[in-house]
Structure formats: structure tokens, C-alpha cells
Amino acid sequence: MNRENRRRQREGADRAQEAPFVCRNCGREVLPDGAGTAHRNHCPHCLCSVHLDDDPGDRAADCGGLMEPVAVWVRKNGEWAIIHRCRVCGKLSSNRVAADDNPLKLMSVALRPLANPPFPVERIEELAAQLDGGERAKCPLPK
Ligand SMILES: [Zn+2]
Ligand SMILES: [Zn+2]
């Protein structure tokens, strides 16, 4: 593919973002309205995205892999953002949540590490007891 064709394809992709599309992961139709932003970059139902950008909005990536939501983090202003990870190349990217993102799906992504702790949950009690006996004594917080 020559450079000119590729540029045309990218411009096409840009326009396509404003049009309804079918999510490659869950198969539901995604409408441009309701996102609360001009750039909807993931499905509001399953939160999946597609690896099209190297930098946000540039459509420069040739990968095209499905990007799954793997985490959420809280920005300075309190707004949530989703970390997407590409299934094909492993690229990580951070994306703002949209106004109509499924709140239960967002919560389930946020809670996933807590639902699968890397140690037995019973140990938390043991660790807390250690804190009480040791480091907690140095801690200025009220007991
Ligand atoms: Zn979807
Ligand atoms: Zn990729």
C-alpha cells in the first residue's frame, strides 16, 4: 500500500469514528451519541477497543488487535480512565471513560485484582495483626 492510500484510509477511519460501528468483541452496535466526547475510542458495553493509534487519535498503528480493558486508574481531577492492553502486541494505553460506559463493567474491571488477590485473603488478618504489634505502634494515626 502506498503512502497516499494509507493517508486516505486514515482519514476514512477518522470519519468512521463519528459513525455507528459494530463492536468487534461483543458485536453490539455502538452509536456516536451519548459518549460525552467527540472521540469515542472504546465500546461502552464491553469497554473493548481496537489498536489503531500509536498516539491518541493518530490512526498510525498497523496492528489492529483487540484491546481489552485490564485496569482503571483515577486521574488527578477524580475522573476514571481505562488502561487498555492489546491482545496482539501487548501495547498499553490509557483512555478517558465516556459518559455512557457501562458502570458495572467499569466496576468489575476495577475490582478484578481484589477478587483475585495474589495471596490467601485470610493472610490479611495475620498481616494486620503484625501491623498492630509492630509498625502500627510508630504510626501517628489514632488506634
Ligand atoms: Zn463491545
Ligand atoms: Zn497491538
Image: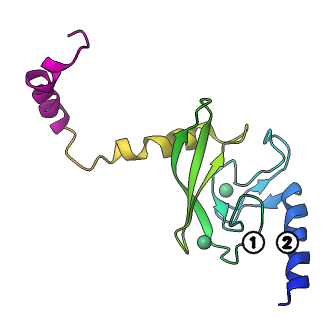
Determine which residue is flagged by label 1: 60
The reply to whether the magenta stretch includes residue 135 is yes
* Residue 128 position in % (x across, y down): 17, 28
* Residue 119 position in % (x across, y down): 21, 47
| Residue 70 vertical placement versus 53 (above, below) | above
Q: Which residues are magenta?
A: 123-143
Q: Earlier in the sequence, mark 2 or mark 1?
A: 2
Q: Kindly identify the residue that appears in the image at 62 percent across and 33 percent down.
A: 79
- The amino acid sitting under disc 1 is Ala
Residue 81, quarter of the rendered image: top right
Left or right of residue 120: residue 15: right
Q: Which quadrant is home to the N terminus? A: bottom right
Left or right of residue 86: residue 16: right
Determine which residue is flagged by label 2: 10
* Residue 117 position in % (x across, y down): 29, 46
Residue 12, quarter of the rendered image: bottom right
Q: Secondary structure at mark 1?
A: loop
Question: Badge 1 local density, few (<14 within 10 Å), some, or many (20+)?
Answer: some
| Residue 36 vertical placement versus 135 (above, below) | below
Q: Is mark 1 within 8 Å of ligand 2?
A: no
Q: Kindly identify the residue that appears in the image at 73 percent across and 55 percent down.
A: 41
Mark number for residue 70?
none
- The amino acid sitting under disc 2 is Arg
Left or right of residue 114: residue 1: right
Q: Secondary structure at mark 2?
A: helix
* Residue 118 position in % (x across, y down): 26, 50
Question: Badge 2 local density, few (<14 within 10 Å), some, or many (20+)?
Answer: some
Q: Kindly identify the residue that appears in the image at 53 percent across and 44 percent down.
A: 72
